[in-house]
Image (cartoon, rainbow, N blue to C red):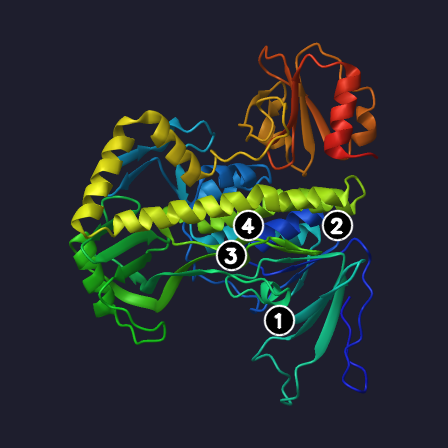
Amino acid sequence: MTSTTDKNGTPRTAVAASRDVIVVGAGPTGLLLAGDLATAGVPVTLVEKRPHRTSNLSRAFVLHARTLEQLDARGLADELESKGQTLDRLRLFSRLTVDLTTLPSRFNHLLVLPQYEVERALERRAVEAGVRFAYETEVTGLVQDADGVTLRLRAAAGTEGADGGARELQELRAAYVVGTDGMRSAVREAVGLPFPGRSAIRSVVLADVRLAEEPETLLTVNAVGDAFAFLAPFGDGYYRVIGWDRRRDVADDAPLDLDEVKEITRLALGRDYGMRDARWMSRFHSDERQAPAYRVGRVFLAGDAAHVHTPAGGQGMNTGLQDAANLSWKLAAALNGHAHADLLDTYQSERHPVGKSVLRSSGGIVRLAMANRPWTLTARTLLTTFLDHARPARTRMIGQITGIGYAYPAPRGAHPLVGKRVPDVALRDGRLYEALRGGRFVLITPSGTPTDPDTDTRKDRLTVAGWASARRTTLLVRPDGYAAWAAEEPTTEELEAALTASMGQD
């Protein structure tokens, strides 16, 4: 699909098949999205500015219940669970204990696992599905038209040929482009979308260290006065330290030594656990930003290219992975001719509000954690006391943090289940999230009820299953695990109409 420049230096456009998709950015969001599309038979190229190498520079360390459910639907959750460590209780603000064992999910816990382990599993899946990778390649611009997108590329800085010559321009042509290329997204800039927001926390320090003393808990986090610190294990003897001292506001490139990391940790956690042997240290600033639109014509944004949040609650990577799970099946349905392109508009209406909600919740957590004025400390005490005693409010908070509490808009008059996440219910043969593997819809019918006589014509994208229980609801589950349609004892005609409306014509 790539091309070289002509004798005048003008890049030749390579004509792509009308069903091609280019995903820009090979982080977790881009890898899951590309793997889903390739599994559905869509030709995919994944463009990545960085070289292809294993990295341990993870910022994300937590997988939440909803994300684990999505990974389970791709056959990866059990493998990742075996590599990580589970945590079923969280301690917030030194006084509020959040019990995750009550979550209505197979994954009623947090999984503490470095991001690079998630990327390895998703990359392997993408390779096996046939995704084409273009590493050390950066986006310099794009042009859209009625039929597709032309993406202009060149070799990333630092990858020029040995002769020192200019980096060669190339062009790729695709039906759609998805930018999953992070906070400084070249795709977002190329379509002219702003990224409004602000820097929420400046001069956050990161370090990978060994500890002489093992922390009492799997995740260690606290804030005292002006200092905040977080410790999480890599699993290889090293720990990631994230720290912040409100009083020290310096540039990201300011020098950093281990003594500064130790001091912040002592202020926030009471001791530094004998930190030593730092293998990596850095500074960064944490922003709160969201693009006003996740779609511009044939170009989409997902993950950090669409929204960035403070690290509080560990929701950044999780939200991006769920963006990808929402968008992938819709793109596949449109490109495979089973859905009208209007289906793609629902990506904005479903995921943009979730991104805004995560922005509010993660920002609220960090502000409460760093409260240091009398009125903010009083507000935090009142809120934690309320959450500790008000079960519905606590359940809603846990649902937002873990992702299982989010639902999508449903048409007026729809069954109460429509738009809601469907748990991993037991089926006559197995369970729902096993049946979702392969990116298909799942139709769950009551025992003894005849199914749509034309189901066989949709067998490449529909799995028919039965309830293991005596439940009488007929339920159609989308590939991302949300209810597309439900009814009590529908007629065959009603079922056929629902399948056509949700899955399109053959």
- Does residue 63 lie above or below 145 as drawn? above
What amino acid is labelled 4 in the image?
Ala
Sequence-first tag of 3 and 2: 2
Q: Is residue 73 visible?
A: yes
In which quadrant will I find the C terminus?
Answer: top right
- Does residue 74 lie above or below 273 as drawn? above
In front: label 1 or label 4: 1
Q: Which residue is mark 3?
A: 304
Sequence-first tag of 3 and 4: 4
- Does residue 390 lie above or below 148 as drawn? above
What amino acid is labelled 1 in the image?
Glu
- Which residue is at a point 43% across and 34% down the rendered structure image? 399
- Relative to 370, 341 lies left or right: right
- Which residue is at a point 26% across and 72% down the rendered structure image? 257
Query: x, y (%) of residue 53?
Result: 53, 65
C-alpha span from label 3 to label 4? 20 Å
Query: x, y (%) of residue 452?
Result: 78, 20
C-alpha span from label 2 to label 4? 20 Å
Q: Secondary structure at mark 2?
A: loop
What amino acid is labelled 2 in the image?
Val
Q: Secondary structure at mark 3?
A: helix
C-alpha span from label 1 to label 2? 22 Å
Sequence-first tag of 3 and 1: 1
- Relative to 85, 338 lies left or right: right
Q: Which residue is mark 2?
A: 42
Residue 45 vs residue 248, the one in the foreground: 248
Q: Which residue is mark 4?
A: 121
In which quadrant will I find the N terminus?
Answer: bottom right
